[in-house]
Amino acid sequence: MITIWFMVAGVLSALILLAMVRLVKGPTAPDRVVAFDVINTLTVGLLLVIGIGFEELFFVEVAIVYALLSFVGTLFIAKYIGGEL
């Protein structure tokens, strides 16, 4: 059963790498912001899957804090790009 969680973690890691390609190649700044947000969301999911795989609550707590900080960071970047800051 544990190997299933680690296979899911591998798929999430591959998706993070694909999103990093879009982050680097993105033709516009909004594309890069969306790629950055996707990476953050996939990272939260990866932390949760790893927490389930290792049966550790610490990873879930880190995922919650990371999700809150990434949300605030994405909002800040979006406002900066929008010119309202």
Image: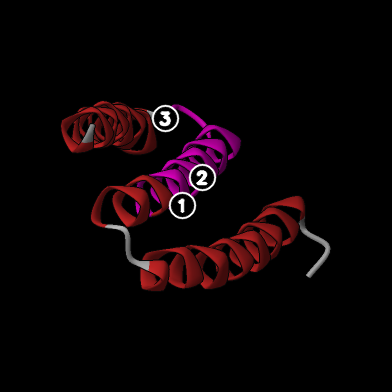
Farthest residue, direction front = 1
User: Three-letter amino acid code at disc 1?
Assistant: Val
How far apart in space, not on screen, are marks 1 and 3 (Cα)?
A: 22 Å
Q: Are marks 3 and 2 in contact (CB under 8 Å)?
A: no
Mark 3 or 2: the one toward you:
2
Estimate the spatial distance between the alpha carbons at disc 3 and disc 2, rounded to whole Å.
Answer: 18 Å
Q: Which mark is residue 26?
A: 3
Residue 85 x, y percent position in the rendering: 78, 70
Identify residue type, mark 2. Answer: Thr
Residue 28 image offset from top left, x and y in percent: 52, 32
Give the answer, above or below, for where 84 lies relative to 2: below
Task: Using the rendered view, name the quadrant where residue 13 is placed.
Answer: top left
Report the residue marked by disc 1. Answer: 44
Q: From this viewpoint, which residue is outermost toward the left?
A: 3
Where are the magenta residues, as a range? Answer: 27-47
Disc 2: which residue: 41
Q: Which residue occupies the foreground of this view, 31 or 47?
A: 47
At numbered mark 2, what does the secondary structure look like: helix, strand or loop? helix
- How far is the residue under mark 1 from the one under mark 2? 5 Å
Query: Do residues under tags 1 and 2 come within 8 Å of each other at their CB atoms?
Result: yes
Q: Is residue 65 left or right of residue 26?
A: right
Q: Residues within 10 Å of mark 2 (few under 14, many from 20)?
A: some
The mark that comes first in sequence, 3 or 2, is 3
Q: Quadrant of residue 1?
A: top left
Q: For the residues carrying marks 1 and 3, which lies nearer the camera in this image?
A: 1
Q: Residue at x 56, y 37 (%)?
A: 34
Residue type for callout 3: Gly
Q: Earlier in the sequence, mark 1 or mark 3?
A: 3
Give percent across and percent down for residue 46: 36, 46
Identify the element where label 3 is drawn: loop
